[in-house]
Image (cartoon, coloured by chain):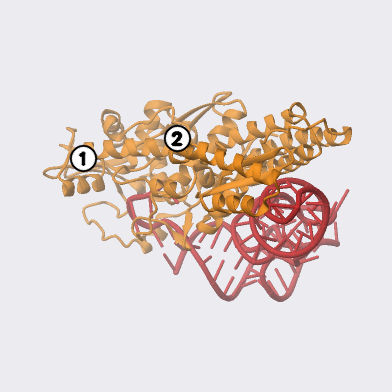
Amino acid sequence: MSIQIYNTLSRKKEPFETLEPGKVKMYVCGPTVYNKAHIGHAMSALVFDIIRRYLEYRGYTVEFAMNFTDVDDKIIRRANEMNIDPFELAEGYIKDFEKNMADLNIKPATINPRASHEIDQIIEMVEGLISKGYAYPLEGDVYFRVRKDPNYGKLSGRNLDDMRVGVRKEADDRKEDPMDFALWKSAKAGEPAWESPWGPGRPGWHIECSAMNLHYFGESIDIHGGGNDLIFPHHENEIAQSESLTGKRFARYWVHNGMLQLRGEKMSKSIGNIISIDEFLTQHSADAFRYLILNSAYRNPIIFNEDVLSQAEKALERIRFGLRPAEASAAGASREVLDALASQIALTRVGFTNAMDDDFNSAGALGQIFELIRVINYSRDEGATAEELLPGQELLRELTDVFGLTLTDGEDSGSRKAADPFVQMLVDLRLELRKLKNWALADQIRDQLAAQGVILEDSKEGTVWHWGKNG
RNA sequence: GGCGACGUGGCCAAGUGGAUAAGGCAUGGGUCUGCAAAACCCUGAUCAUCGGUUCAAAUCCGAUCGUCGCCUCCA
């Protein structure tokens, strides 16, 4: 059974077949860099990072492109407000974004094209569309002629006549049709501009993605991704531009992630309920966010609040526990126990792949991982040695790597590291008190350490300790 | 107004026609422990409502209620 991917274009799951065997050309719409990235951007980036990692796990070579829109009305407006150069502004936010991605353990794209670097390609494309009759210049602007494209609306399932009812934007009487969209915009005074056959100007929003794809990947790609809020008009317009020009199918699979739900509504700039990635990471781990994504279907909206985040942190502790070493006193587990572990390893390996093959059902795959953890823990309790636990723990690490989970628990933060020797000292002291059966004092130390975020666990072999979540 | 998605135990969430409805978090009971913690074992839902199709439905169809998204910059 091959990988099945839900294609927005056909509204159903389709078997995954690449244009070239073993190779995937994947393009995901990146941010417009006029502000700090927020957790909605993070969701989209995480979804496609997981898809990419899984395709690589399944043996594909993935060429992964994500663009930066660095020429845009909002960038220009903000730069003017701040009285700095728009490209300087964009550059700063690109650096921020790349740091956010690294902090979230998202693999870097193979290429990060930028609109401002693709002007020649864009102009060439616009000229091509004009010469084929799909576009027309108008007082220094160039517009795409939507009525000329019989397939316009095929991705979003709309037709032009229905849409006219809903158009709230004031119509621009100069255009042939209100739905015609800008490929090229003439420059106003003080705006960054490039020379073009239609006078100085800059590209419209949609054309950059078409141009970049054509430039780096050619006429057709395998997967085009993005948030489902981009389906219309952005992706619809990309299809119109690319396919009108080349006559070839642009993207084989259109993959869209659902929106993050914050307080019951989409987080967005216009509503003003934004949480930046930086803000999020001061409170929670990258793994916690990734777990939320993994624990649900990428196409559905995700509920995001403190409650589900703390559930995620707990679940991650459980996953980490699966990787804990054997007991020091382990003398080997029974035949039955080891057989059960071996058979669970086989079940999990198959179950994981089956789930992920089914349109990246990460929640189902995660269930398989937890089954494995349960059996590993049981085996450890039953006295399995390090060597006996190894195959299970190796698989656990292998699969959590595919998911991109780091499974570090925050103990590497600087202030905690510095406190480690003192914590250890108190733990050692407490161990002596316990030998003397001075339970009152021993418990007092444990309580006070707990108040500082240190969790103690006593066992026959002594005491192990670790930092809790927000210690 | 048009297009679309969703509604599964206290919470999050898989499953989308067929045998006991995954998994995580929380709850209750137990094993272990000086007591805890962790781990392990046990513990709960007939799937928004109503009506249909079918030998068989959470899973298909229709209606109703509710939530959300897109139609305008948006991941």
Q: Write down which chain is painted orange.
A: A
Q: What percent of the width, then of the height, locates residue A241?
A: 37, 39
Residues at circles 1 and 2 in contact by the CB criterion of under 8 Å: no
- Whether residue A139 sits left or right of residue A443 in the image: it is left
SS assignment at label 2: strand
Name the residue carrying label 1. Answer: A86
- Residue A205: quadrant of the picture: top left
Viewer-nearest residue: A452 or A313 = A452
Q: Write down which chain is painted red.
A: B
Number of the front mark, 1 or 2:
1
Determine the residue positioned at 64% across, 34% down. Answer: A399
Name the residue carrying label 2. Answer: A27
Q: Chain of mark 1?
A: A
- Whether residue B26 sits left or right of residue A471 in the image: it is right
Task: Identify which amino acid the numbered label 1 is placed on.
Answer: Pro
Viewer-nearest residue: A447 or A265 = A447
Q: Is residue A121 above or below residue A285?
A: above
Viewer-nearest residue: A385 or A13 = A385
SS assignment at label 1: helix
Q: What percent of the width, then of the height, locates residue A309?
A: 53, 53
Q: Quadrant of the N terminus of chain A?
A: top right
For marks 1 and 2, give the CA distance. 25 Å
Dot 1 crowding, Cα within 10 Å, few <14, some 14–19, many 20+: many
